[in-house]
Amino acid sequence: MAPCSSYHWTYNSSSCCRTRRASWEVFGEPQVQIQIPISVLLPVSSVEAVNNTKSSLRKWSRSAESRKRKNYPLSLSLCNGSGSKTTDPNPIPIPIPPIPSPRRRWLMMSNSSTRKNISTSNHLRHVESMASLPSGAGKISHLNAVILGEALASEEDDLVFPSDDFSRQALVPSPDKYLEMYKRSIEDPAGFWSDIASEFYWKEKWAPDVYSENMDVRKGNIKIEWFKGGITNICYNCLDRNIEAGSGSKIAIYWEGNEPGCDSSLTYSQLRDKVCQLANYLLKIGVEKGDSVIIYLPMLMELPIAMLACARIGAVHSVVFAGFSSESLAQRIVDCKPKLVITCNAVRRGSKVIQLKDIVDAALRESNNYGISVDVCLVYENTSAMKREETKWQKGRDVWWQDVIPTYPTTCAVRWVDAEDPLFLLYTSGSTGKPKGVLHTTGGYMVYTATTFKYAFDYKSSDIYWCTADCGWITGHSYVTYGPMLNGATVIIYEGAPNYPNAGRCWDIVDKYKVTIFYTAPTLYVTHYSRKSLRILGSVGEPINPSAWRWFFNVVGDSRCPISDTWWQTETGGFMITPLPGAWPQKPGSATFPFFGVQPVIVDEKGVEIEGECSGYLCVKGSWPGAFRTLYGDHERYETTYFKAFPGYYFSGDGCSRDKDGYHWLTGRVDDVINVSGHRIGTAEIESALVSHSQCAEAAVVGVEHEVKGQGIYAFVTLVEGVPYSEDVRKSLILAVRNQIGAFAAPEKIHWAPGLPKTRSGKIMRRILRKIASKQLDELGDTSTLADPAVVDQLIALGDC
Ligand code: 6R9
């Protein structure tokens, strides 16, 4: 494929998606909002960044002010079901974590005296704070970061309005239009979704029942079906349908290699040719409908090609993020017993070469020990990282992609499948060690990802779309591959690291391809690049705090681009709560309102729906087409984890507040709550208090066992650049928490943390922090997905300081 000589992968590109805001979770681990800032791996001229921001801000405030005078209808009274309170007479006893206390929106907003008096030069706060660490634990290079303080944007007006020009051209141009569509989607889901589904190709139409569901464990097994009996194929709908509609010569994928100048592209027709060649090979080696295929590839074009090839023949793909260790890969192989594994020989991350094939070999050996043998390992030769002669090879099992795939025909008949036939498995970690195989089926997922993509990004056929996620995560499934391609969009896939070879790389790419929709976590670089092409920004993976939101809006989007802060999960398949960018004013930090067909409800610990302004557990009433249907091989775990806590609802595991205007504010995972001497306190609140301290760049709080209090508060803290890690700072941090929350919340221990263990998808691995805090160092578990595993040793070394 890529005709360039140095075709290699240096880093998981998801690191710039869902990469940090200040501290997040991984895999079912808690997430919290802390008000400090987003860390921006700052490139160049910070002064320029600040100047840009200030002028953008002035423009933005003026336009917001003028629109405010128009009396925009703010209180969208959304349908929250019947409105009746539902109490379960016979609740199923399963432990429910304590409810998080109402979200502090945020300390900085409610308490202006705690707000820092930020001068221009204070806006940028370095996180690289190793200078005066109490013990030399080595330097962490990736922390060359800068933080933008919250005073960058004005808080005088908390509403941000889409411009008239934007709204005029938007698919959903007003709150009224949204309400009309939303109302129909709730009152007549069958009609609403079947109208949309009819825009796709179905070999046979679904049975008269558009959907059937049981979301209530008290009434029997949980079952969700959409478009059952409908016969279709998602690969056909992504490729053939668009080609037949005349888009064959439209670019489907721009691939940007790690090395600047190394790029490639495929039109929709070329992509279909490649998909068909691989699909023919899969058929030849005996892969049949329903068989699973593990894909362990970095962000090469071969990754979506492999996903689409499986879909074309009805095989079930399971993409394993290529940063996972051999143990994690083996666990997944043993669970889903694939017919083959697709990988490449090696990848380059920075100057480091990672021998992926060695990892696969080890995983296959390990799976053999569990009696699972895989007959074929298809290996893409990634010449820039490793030559084929140097690759270890198992004759009879291993096959070079380049030797066989191009020899197959470029047409391949589609295998038609039922809408409820499985499309893919994606493993996500749960509270126990065993990963959960989240299973999505074909028809509902297809309709839902396509529709959410279209509306949340206000998609136009002229858009150039870049989602920085890796296909190893759900975002890469729904919003790199399926959602955009179902809409015939042009998608960018970037192989490399966001800061390679320099911090302006992402904006280079935005400018090079004239990206119009940019979907990421807001951890990017402020540079001199124009970014003029951008019209919509998207954010995912973690709650975005208001100051981060403002920075993203003012600086990255030049106060011109609405932000779609999309709340969703691997399990939900697609966006659940998200702005529709032209429809309503946004509140920085809020994911706003539900997508069509989604009925979010907030319940208390008894499972009683709470109305109006409130805070509680975020559940969903009724099914939506993109919902996962089961956990592979463990339907009971599916029911227990998601449906038993609050019978009658899908329980997301997240906490959420709803304000008086109906806006939703995600507060992170609800298990992220500490109980100190009977006081429940969300780690988010303590972190918020810590980062409000002018010298604190980042904080992550966990609970540890405490003889007297039950749980004690243990805080990992990163200081801003140049601030010495000293007893005085420690005391003043504790004081900050005492002052802002109360003495009971004062951390028992402040653990200096020049870096925090984060995955490349940007979430903090609190599991590891808990083990470090409780000194269970032999139980750290798998640290292979960390962006920088060296952080762990460093934290351990600093444990007694
Ligand atoms: C898409 C994805 C899901 C968890 C979810 C929530 C958090 C995702 C968010 C968000 C606040 C957002 N989350 N998007 N929290 N605002 N816009 O990330 O899937 O990896 O399964 O994580 O991520 O806590 O429960 P997944």
Image (cartoon, rainbow, N blue to C red):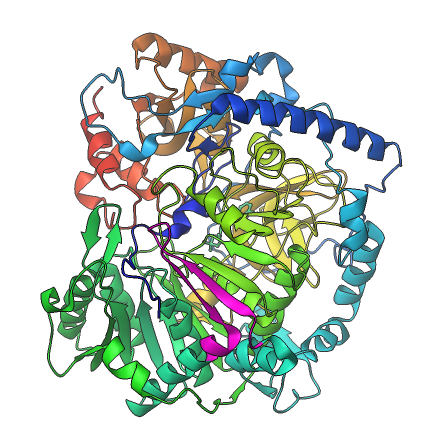
Q: Is residue 427 above or below residue 722?
A: below
Percent x, y for residue 539?
A: 55, 46
Which residue is painted at 50% across and 15% down in the image?
A: 122
**Bounds of the magenta span?**
248-272
- Is-magenta flag for residue 261? yes
Percent x, y for residue 506?
A: 45, 44
Residue 278 position by quadrant? bottom left
User: Along the line of sight, which residue is nearer the eye, 54 or 453?
Assistant: 54
User: Along the line of sight, which residue is nearer the eye, 350 or 84?
Assistant: 350
Q: How many numbered callouts?
A: 0
User: Along the line of sight, which residue is nearer the eye, 388 or 115?
Assistant: 388
- Is-magenta flag for residue 531? no
For residue 338, side relative to residue 525 (left or right) = left
Q: Is residue 282 above or below residue 352?
A: below
Q: Is residue 559 above or below residue 398?
A: above
Q: Quadrant of the C terminus?
A: top left
Residue 660 position by quadrant? top right
Q: Quadrant of the N terminus?
A: bottom left
